[in-house]
Amino acid sequence: MYLNHFQLKQKPFNLTPDADMFYLGDAQQKALNTLAIALQQGEGFIKISGEVGTGKTTLCRKLMAMLGDNYHVAHINNSFVNPCEFKLLLAHELGIELNHNVPSYRILLHIQKQLVTLARKNKKVVLIIDEAQAMPRDTLEALRLISNLETGKRKLIQIILLGQPELDDVLARNDMRQLNQRIAYQAELRPMDSADSMSYLATRIQFAGGHEKLLTPKSKELLCRYSKGNPRVLNILADKALMCAFSEGEPQVTKKSVMSAVADSKAVMPEESPLFPRWAVAACVAAALIIPGGVGLWT
């Protein structure tokens, strides 16, 4: 909607995880290094934890884009399933199509056979499970048993658990100690500090083909403060601020645009009272649709 106005090639702050716009801050670099080392070693579970919006899925997609042809990646993003459903999902990711009526033990046999076949082709299998904190206890136990599959020399499958901090509480339970002991590598994605947040904004704008002065110094400061270093919240605020600046016909995002975005966003807890009511951004959008040429920018 505002791309032509700001001469952008694409939206710089899209909420959809995009590996091409991955920002490699300090926490992201450490997590990526942990994943690379763990996969090279070829053993054990790997755990990446972080609060909602800290970039776990984006990190996962960046990793998937980096892995070579010698890897077969299975990605499960719906973890709230029973053991049988989980095995069927894994089988599908491994290229095995099975009827839902197949007994659970036979699904496991098919999975083992396929893992052996891939190993003979020198393929390393990596299973990535998103939102792992939501996995039921019985499904986690099924996952642990699948991790036991190995040849005489190496594991047939490596498992990466991506989850919110609640995942630590789940794994700390006494009945989960066997699985918890198998986590050989782990990293935590924390909110970005001020320097990383500033760099994140600049990197995103650069990727989108924008000018570095698209955001005023004060607007960048406010975006970093109110987002509290959370990448998702920062994207939400920055995108809404661009929308408001566009509706006002401004060539860059100002303090006023940011504060309109802050007032409209339930995802943030501002440190001071918002300067605008919650309908501010809605009013910005309405204004954008009635300004000359505004409707044409939808296409």
Image (cartoon, rainbow, N blue to C red):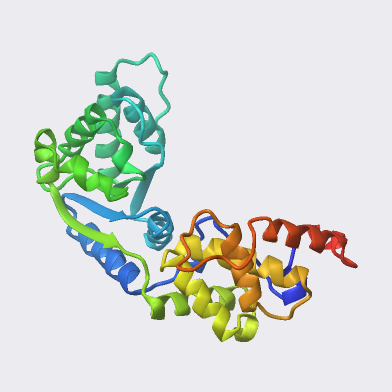
**What residue appears at the point 24 percent right and 64 percent down from the top-left corner?**
34
Q: What percent of the width, then of the height, locates residue 57?
A: 41, 54
Q: Eyeballing the image, is 86 above or below 50?
A: above
Q: Is residue 152 visible?
A: yes
State the residue in front, 250 or 58.
250
Task: Give the side of residue 178 with respect to residue 208, left or right.
Answer: left
Q: Residue 213 occupies which quadrant of the picture?
A: bottom right
**What residue appears at the point 20 percent right and 44 percent down from the top-left corner?**
169
Q: Is residue 12 visible?
A: no
Task: Give the side of residue 209 with respect to residue 233, left or right.
Answer: right
Q: What percent of the width, then of the height, locates residue 114?
A: 30, 35
Q: Eyeballing the image, is 168 above or below 22?
A: above
State the residue in front, 107 or 219.
219
Q: What percent of the width, then of the height, locates residue 54?
A: 39, 60
**What residue appears at the point 46 percent right and 79 percent down from the top-left corner?**
199
Of the 4 image quadrants, the one containing the N terminus is bottom right
Q: Residue 282 occupies which quadrant of the picture?
A: bottom right
**What residue appears at the point 44 percent right and 71 percent down from the top-left corner?**
23
Of the 4 image quadrants, the one containing the C terminus is bottom right
